[in-house]
Image: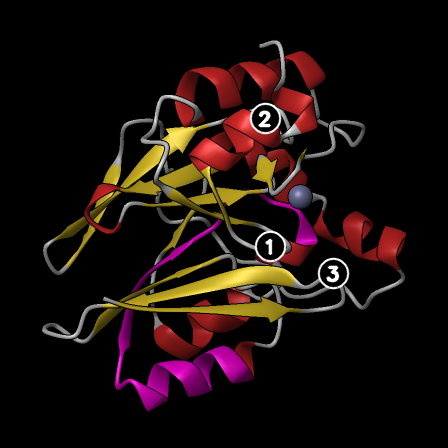
Amino acid sequence: MIHEILPVGMLQCNCSIFGDEATHEAIVIDPGDQIDEILLVLARHKLTVKAIVITHAHIDHVGGAAKLKAATGAPVCMNAKDQELYDGLEMQAAWLGMEPPDRTDVDSPARDGDSLTLGQTSFQVLHTPGHTQGSISLWIPGENKLIAGDTLFRDSIGRTDLPGGDGRQILSSIHTKLMALPETAVVIPGHGPNTTIGREKARNPFLQGL
Ligand SMILES: [Zn+2]
């Protein structure tokens, strides 16, 4: 499996590009910005985008979804509980002093328990609310990898002081959904360096005493 992680945009959101060598299909997760560079990576590996998955509707994660969809024709998958946040994309842009990017329709809801397949590999949707109400994580058992969005970081967790945030709920999501995964699972957070479930279980200061 091809997996490239591209930190994009002003807030350096980790955009993940997964590609299957046999089918040449790709799943792009969190194309927040720098769509031209994402398209170059796809072209370099001769990949066709099958799905665009959004972990949550903050502008740094979803900002380039419309542009990537226009360029590839791939459907956008996002949890419906973040639609309201996505509808407020212009307002999010204003908070950051950015030009508002185009918005698009969400094609598929990314509900808890849904899964996408890329070649032989399944990408399982875990609804992990707390950072936002529609936050999801993607568990890829065949790769032993978790795409955590802004729910879990190395040594930290997602902020819960923005609209739709809930501090108790994010801890419950992490405890019940993420800490249940294998300790060896590699976590790719929405920002910053990778980690593992085991490392965060042992050392993340926000998760001690859970
Ligand atoms: Zn966020």
- Front one among 38 and 78: 38
Q: How many marks?
A: 3
SS assignment at label 1: helix
Amino acid type assigned to the residue bearing label 1 in the image = His
Task: Locate residue 69: give its quadrant.
Answer: bottom left
The location of residue 44, given as percent across then percent down, is 34, 90
Identify the amino acid type marked 2.
Gln
Q: Which of marks 2 and 3 is nearer the N terminus?
A: 3
> 192 or 27, which is in the foreground?
192
Whether ligand 1 has any atom under 8 Å from the Cβ at mark 1 is answered as yes
**Residue 11: numbered disc:** 3
Whether residues under marks 3 and 1 lie with C-beta atoms below 8 angstroms apart, the answer is no
Does the magenta-highlighted stretch encompass residue 196?
Answer: no
In the figure, 116 relative to 75: above or below? above
Label 3 to label 1: alpha-carbon separation: 9 Å
User: Hey, what amino acid is under mark 3?
Assistant: Leu
Query: Residue visible at 28% across and 27% down?
Result: 113
Asked if residue 172 is positioned above or below residue 135 in the image, the reply reads above
Q: Give the range drawn in magenta.
A: 37-59
Closer to the chain start, of discs 3 and 1, is 3
* Position of 128 relative to 152 (above/below): above
The N terminus lies in which quarter of the figure?
bottom left
What residue lies at 27% left-to-right and 79% top-to-bottom? 47
Q: Mark 1 points at which residue?
A: 61
